[in-house]
Structures are given as C-alpha cells and as structure tokens.
Amino acid sequence: MDASPPRLEIRNLTRRYDGRVVVEDVSLAVQPGQVTCLLGPSGCGKSTTLRMIAGVEMQDSGEIWVDGKLICDTVFRIPPERRHIGLMFQDFALFPHLRVGENVAFGLEGDKVEKGKRVETLLARVGMQSYVDAYPHELSGGEQQRVALARALAPRPRIMLMDEPFSGLDNRLRDGIRDETLEILREQDTAVLLVTHEPEEAMRMADEIALMRGGRIVQQGAPYNIYNAPMDRDAVSFFSDINVIRGDVKGSLVDTPFGQFLAPGVMEGHEVEIVIRPQHIKIDFDRDGRGPNSTPADGTPARGIVQRARFMGSESLMEFRMDHDGSILKATVPNVFLPKPGKPLWLMIRRDRCFVFPVKG
Ligand SMILES: Nc1ncnc2c1ncn2[C@@H]1O[C@H](COP(=O)(O)OP(=O)(O)OP(=O)(O)O)[C@@H](O)[C@H]1O
Ligand SMILES: [Mg+2]
C-alpha cells in the first residue's frame, strides 16, 4: 500500500456567510498526478472551497494539508503566496502591460534561456506560440484564457486549483486544450482540483468526482461509479435526462405497467421512483397491437405513441405518450431512427440499468 500522504487533503472545511452555511464539512484528498472534480450546480459552494484552499478566504473550521503538512487551520495559516498552489480561476487576469511571453515567464525562476524555452514549450502546447510578443488587449477572450493556462502551468505547481478554466473556449478548441492541459499536469505529477458544473467535463477529466450539493459533498468516487451507482434521483439527473415511473412497494416488489421491479430495503407501502435514462429504454416494433414477450432482463413491454423524433447527430431522440397513463417518456437510440409521429412502439426498461429510490419526504 502507498504510505505517502496525499498531495492535497482537506478535512471538514466549513464556511458560513452571515450565519448561512455555504460549505459544510467538506473533506477530500488528491494524490499527485490525479484529478478530482468538484461537480455541482451553481451556488453549491465549489468556488468557495477552492478559495479557502488557495488561501484567499478563511474557513470557519477545518484543516488543509499539503504533503502531510498542515498549511491552514483556524489558528495557523500559511499565506497564499507561500502555498505554491497554481490557480486558474474564472476571472483570470493577464498583466496588461506585459507581453504574452512575459506573462507566462512571470512566476518562473532560472536563467533567461531556460525560462525562454519553458515559455516557448507551453505557448506551443496551448497553440499560442506565434503570439509571444503580443499584448493581452490584442487577443480574443479565448486566446487570453489559453495564455493564462500556460502561465498557471509554467512554474510546475504541486497543486493546481482550476475553477471552470475552459468555460471561455469554443467546443472544438476546448477538447484539445483540455486534453493538452491534463497531459501537462500529469507529466508534472501535479494534484488537480477542478471545479465544473458540466458533467461531461467532469467525466472527461476526472479520476474522481466529488458531487456537491448545498455546500456538502453528497457522493464521491470514480466517474464510472458515480454514473452507474448514483445515490439518488438528483445524482442521476445531474448527468443525463431521466424518465421517472412511480409505484408502491408490496412485499419488496413494485408493480408497474413495465412489470415488477425489486425494491430491496424499502419499507412496505412506501412509494418509490424507478429512474431510467433515455438510452437505457429498449424499443421494439408493434405486431398487430402486441409487443415482444416479457423477459426477466427487460420486464414487460408497454405501448407508447411517438410524439416526436429528432436526429441529434450520434443518436436519435424520441418522445412517447404512453397508452397506460398518458405520461411522456423519452428514449434515445444510436444513429438514425426517426419513426413518424403517431406510430405505436413498445418500450421496455432494462432492469440492470434502472435505479429504484424511495420517494423522499
Ligand atoms: N463573499 C460572499 N458573501 C456572501 N455570500 C457569498 C459570498 N461568496 C459566495 N457566497 C454565497 O455562497 C454560496 C456558494 O457560492 P460559490 O461561489 O462557492 O458557488 P459555486 O458552487 O462556485 O457556484 P457557480 O457554479 O455559480 O460558480 C452562494 O450562495 C453564494 O451566493
Ligand atoms: Mg463558482
């Protein structure tokens, strides 16, 4: 087992504004060369958490540790400039009076030749090498952001805190810059804590995702686990569209128009929600008013009428009005499948891909 302490560890961080708790008891650890994503909706406390780690804001309680050394609690505090933490925040600012190359070189130590090489390498990797002598005001917003990234990466920080660092880039550029940045950070063995409210970005970048809600981390794990074993309905819907079917538990089972579902551990008589992503609904053709046979894996088919079908590029999205209760369900299939509105089709719910949660409250 690896006995070395995490590069970054925060323990029970809490922050209140005017008596309102905005970050509550947040703990996590990031190893060198690893990326942890704080993922959550607007206002859930992501940036506040990063600001405390950066040292530009003080926690009300909790501790911050780097490589096994305490750098901040409520009594002891190493100032921000001595934490050797790289920052790439939403409201990044380049020095307006310095050229691009000078901006990137700003925090670097060593001789001129060495610095020049490092600046050149980093600008090349973010695709800005030809702008080395330009001033920030001569660049577009996205170009400035790429320079800011190069500047943040240049001193090889041991920890990098990034708050939506790619938000100003267009999609095509973003994927490339994002991958390039990650590669540089991994090469440098930097521990990265990245804030985003975009699940795709978190899935693409993170070794671990910490799902935040209302100031707390509600679930933490590898992207695969968070996606496939979400803790509740909101955790499912954070990553994709969902369909919800309700029912009551009788003898550990829920009876629905799609057949029976297991509801282990839910009290008798309690209402549950069966949550299924559109891509996990199975679709089959109508055979003179009948659907396919029931199976243990897919349950009982229920009939719906196509309301609309849209081609989305890599998949097609359909909306159905269900015969049994008039509810609308969404389903997607890969590639092109565009049945006409009014067409009856049969829908099945994959038992290995649906989630059954007790209704709260
Ligand atoms: N200086 C402050 N004074 C009072 N309240 C604040 C202050 N800074 C943040 N808050 C509040 O704390 C909560 C968390 O803010 P924070 O900026 O951490 O959210 P966030 O998760 O980064 O959201 P977003 O995704 O929109 O950036 C918000 O409700 C915000 O209004
Ligand atoms: Mg924020």
Image: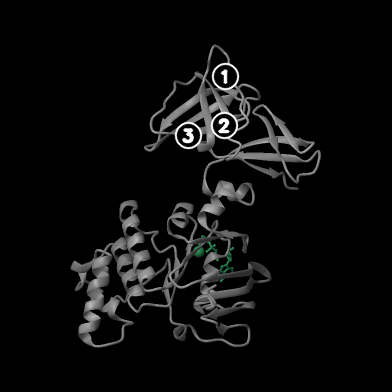
Q: Residue drawn 76% across and 44% down?
A: 266
Q: CA distance from mark 3 to mark 2?
A: 10 Å
- Name the residue that disc number 3 marks: 332
What amino acid is found at the position of numbered circle 3 in the picture? Thr
Looking at the image, can residue 97 be seen?
Answer: no
Disc 1/disc 2 C-alpha distance (Å): 17 Å
Q: Residues within 10 Å of mark 2 (few under 14, many from 20)?
A: many
At mark 3, the secondary structure is strand
| SS under mark 2 | strand
Chosen colour scheme: one colour
Q: Does the residue at mark 3 contact the one at mark 2 (Cβ under 8 Å)?
A: no
Q: Is residue 343 visible?
A: yes
> Residue 286: horizontal and vertical position, in percent?
53, 17
Residue picked out by circle 2: 329
Eyeballing the image, is 39 above or below 147? above
- Furthest residue in direction top, as rendered: 288
- Residue at 64 percent across and 28 percent down: it is 258
Amino acid type at image mark 1: Gly
Tell us which disc is closer to us: 1 or 2.
Answer: 1
Q: Position of residue 335 (x, y in %)?
A: 39, 33
Q: Is residue 179 above or below residue 15?
A: above
Disc 1 on helix, strand or loop?
A: loop
The answer to which of marks 1 and 3 sits earlier in the sequence is: 1
User: Comparing marks 1 and 3, which lies closer to the viewer?
Assistant: 1
Q: Amino acid at mark 2?
A: Leu
Residue 326 at what x, y percent from top left? 62, 25
Give residue 252's position: percent from left, percent from top.
Answer: 76, 39
- How far apart are the alpha carbons under marks 1 and 3? 19 Å
Residue 291: which numbered mark, if any? 1
118, 81: nearer the viewer: 118
